[in-house]
Amino acid sequence: MDCPSCEEHIGWDWVEDEEIEPNEVFECPECEESLRYFIDEGTYLGPQHKTVEVVS
């Protein structure tokens, strides 16, 4: 996934290593922007679609 603020790639391995759960706020390792990701299940994009958003 890419950070919506700095567009730096954040690997899912890093997310798993940090034990970050969906809807949990975390900081981008590059720009330190507060982010959150969520999983939308059963969309037209496939069985699971992950979205990252900036939390203000």
Image (cartoon, rainbow, N blue to C red):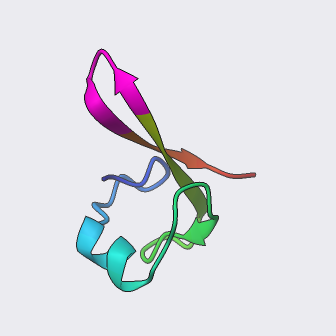
- In the picture provided, is 26 more to the left or to the right than 4? right
The chief SS type of the magenta part is strand
Q: Residue at x 34, y 84 (%)?
A: 17
Give coordinates of residue 8: x percent, y percent: 32, 60
User: Residue 50, image x and y in percent?
Assistant: 38, 42
Residue 39 is one of the magenta-drawn residues: no
Residue found farthest to the top: 44
Judge whether 18 appears above or below 1 on screen: below
Depth order, front residue of 38/26: 38
Q: How many labels does the image show?
A: 0
Measuring 28% from the left and 66% from the top, which residue is drawn there? 12
Residue placed at 32% from the left, 36% from the top? 48
Above or below — where is 39 with respect to 40? below
**Who's the residue at 49% across and 72% down the image?**
20
Tell me if 45 is positioned left or right of 24 in this view.
left
- Can the viewer see residue 41 in this picture? yes
Where residue 6 sits, quadrant-wise, is bottom left
Q: Nearer the viewer, residue 29 or 48?
A: 48
Task: Reply above or below: 4 against 40.
Answer: below
Q: Where is residue 54 in the image (x, y as percent from the top left)?
A: 60, 49
**Which residue is most to the bottom?**
17
Answer with the quarter of the image where residue 18 lies.
bottom left
Q: Give the range drawn in magenta.
A: 41-49
How far from the left and from the top, in percent, is residue 34? Answer: 63, 63
> 51 or 40: which is nearer to us?
40
- Side (left or right) of 3 relative to 13: right
25, above or below 2, in the image: below
Q: Does the image show residue 11?
A: no
Q: Residue 45: say if magenta.
A: yes
